[in-house]
Image (tube, coloured by chain):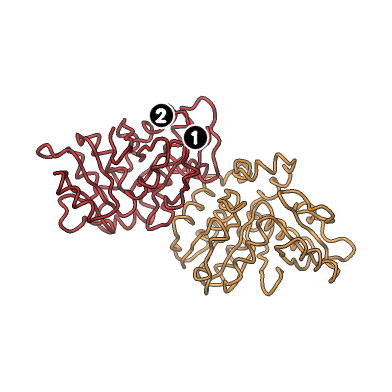
Chain colours: A red, B orange
């Protein structure tokens, strides 16, 4: 098994994804939110890049509309991108979400050329690691990044998944240096994943917006045992 | 003080370098070799990108010719790119080197737009950190990378310099996430920098070429107290 990591989703190539299992990370917060929602009673999440397209889809199909830009809920949207908004499950049977975020939703779509696309985060690290091993293919770790830049929160999410892969795999996987560095970073922060999220510049920005509880939530290693799959146009468990 | 890290030298922008102090890293092995040579009696190193240009300069000016491609000494060159070849000092007064390597020499030249360009490695981490702090500008850490890819050995070199900067700076510097990750990786490997070099894919390649002693040498933290400067066309202490 061969493992590569791309720190910014826009740099991932179709060539790297071809025949591989991709795991997409936007730890703060899109993939953590998707994992939380699908573990809490939501049935399906449509990741949509464009705000107007998301609004139109929600309106036409009666879906629940959620999203953020710059870390803050989009004006007029009933829901933002905090996992805490979704952890209590859907209201009044509206269990299909349309989600548009600054980085994560585009990252998920950028991995679509892979054989299988899984949703990764710290809160489902072990489950997504096992699902990827079960697939038996090479693995491409696709980090969303933040505004086109390397973002430590995503690298840490990939690193925690790598720790689980290394622990569970029959033979040691071959890794590129980006994946190896992510693994070492997760080991560095393993006693306190929250410290890693708080150290990251994106984490600091969210702290500045008063979103401390989101960081606490996103740092809860292996909270959920699900590995949501993106296929066709949506994500499901 | 603001610190940014570029994991691959070809991606560094003139904008990022403008007004800043750059520190260039090709830990395995060009910058380690340059630091060793200039600490061992060599007076000056000309980093040259092109093999023919290096040969011509050495012939016309009577300089000592050194270099590698793919980790191995270039055919017809008297010296390769192993720091061990230079640690005993120059022979017969030939104390000016022309050096051409796969990644490092181009990386040094790619940083030329900075206000000052320093030569960084694990073996001179503390000295180069202090020199950069003394300059008082923002710092750009330019990693050579290997074949255009992120290379853990260079990131680790930058990380060890960051550990020294953090220890010596009056106020905590602001870092981008790439720099922060390098700092954490150096802390992860601080008891055994050699293990970090051996884990890296570039290190493994050199081990496969029988260059184990080079890795041992390049991992000797703070072996030298020099911070060579690249200006004009050459590097000097």
Q: Which residue is mark 2?
A: A130
Task: Output the chain of dot 1.
Answer: A
Q: Is residue A224 above or below residue B181?
A: above
- Badge 1 element: loop
Q: Residue drawn 76% across and 68% down?
A: B44
Q: Is residue A186 left or right of residue A210?
A: right
Q: Is residue A201 above or below residue B234?
A: above
- The location of residue A127, given as percent across then percent down, is 36, 31
- Badge 2 element: helix
For the residues labelled 2 and 1, the Cα–Cα distance comes to 13 Å
- Closer to the camera in the image, B136 or B168: B136
Q: Is residue B19 left or right of residue A210?
A: right
- Closer to the camera in the image, A110 or A213: A110
- The location of residue A197, given as percent across then percent down, is 36, 49
Q: Is residue B18 above or below residue A150?
A: below
Q: Which residue is mark 1?
A: A138
Mark closer to the chain start, 2 or 1: 2
- Closer to the camera in the image, A173 or B132: A173
> How many numbered markers are drawn?
2
- Closer to the camera in the image, A212 or B146: B146
Asked if residue A128 shows in the view, the reply is yes
Q: Residue drawn 68% across and 75% down?
A: B232
- The location of residue B191, given as percent across then percent down, is 58, 44
- The location of residue B150, given as percent across then percent down, is 55, 51
Task: Output the chain of dot 2.
Answer: A
């Amino acid at each position: 098994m061969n493992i590569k990591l791309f720190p910014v989703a826009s740099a991932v190539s179709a060539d790297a994804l071809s025949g591989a299992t991709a795991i997409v990370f936007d730890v703060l917060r899109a993939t953590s939110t998707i994992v939380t929602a699908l573990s809490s009673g939501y049935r399906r999440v449509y990741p949509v890049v464009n705000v107007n397209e998301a609004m139109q889809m929600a309106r036409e199909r009666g879906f629940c509309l959620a999203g953020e830009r710059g870390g803050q809920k989009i004006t007029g949207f009933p829901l933002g991108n905090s996992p805490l908004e979704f952890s209590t499950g859907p209201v009044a049977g509206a269990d299909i979400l349309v989600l548009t975020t600054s980085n994560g939703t585009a990252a998920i779509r950028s991995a679509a050329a892979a054989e299988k696309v899984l949703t990764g985060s710290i809160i489902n690290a072990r489950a997504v690691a096992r699902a990827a091993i079960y697939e038996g293919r090479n693995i491409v770790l696709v980090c969303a990044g933040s505004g086109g830049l390397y973002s430590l929160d995503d690298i840490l999410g990939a690193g925690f998944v790598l720790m689980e892969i290394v622990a569970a795999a029959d033979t040691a996987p071959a890794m590129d240096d980006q994946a190896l560095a992510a693994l070492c970073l997760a080991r560095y922060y393993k006693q306190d994943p929250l410290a890693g999220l708080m150290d990251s510049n994106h984490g600091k920005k969210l702290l500045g917006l008063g979103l401390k509880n989101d960081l606490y939530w996103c740092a809860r290693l292996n909270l959920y045992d699900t590995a949501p799959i993106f296929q066709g146009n949506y994500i499901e468990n």
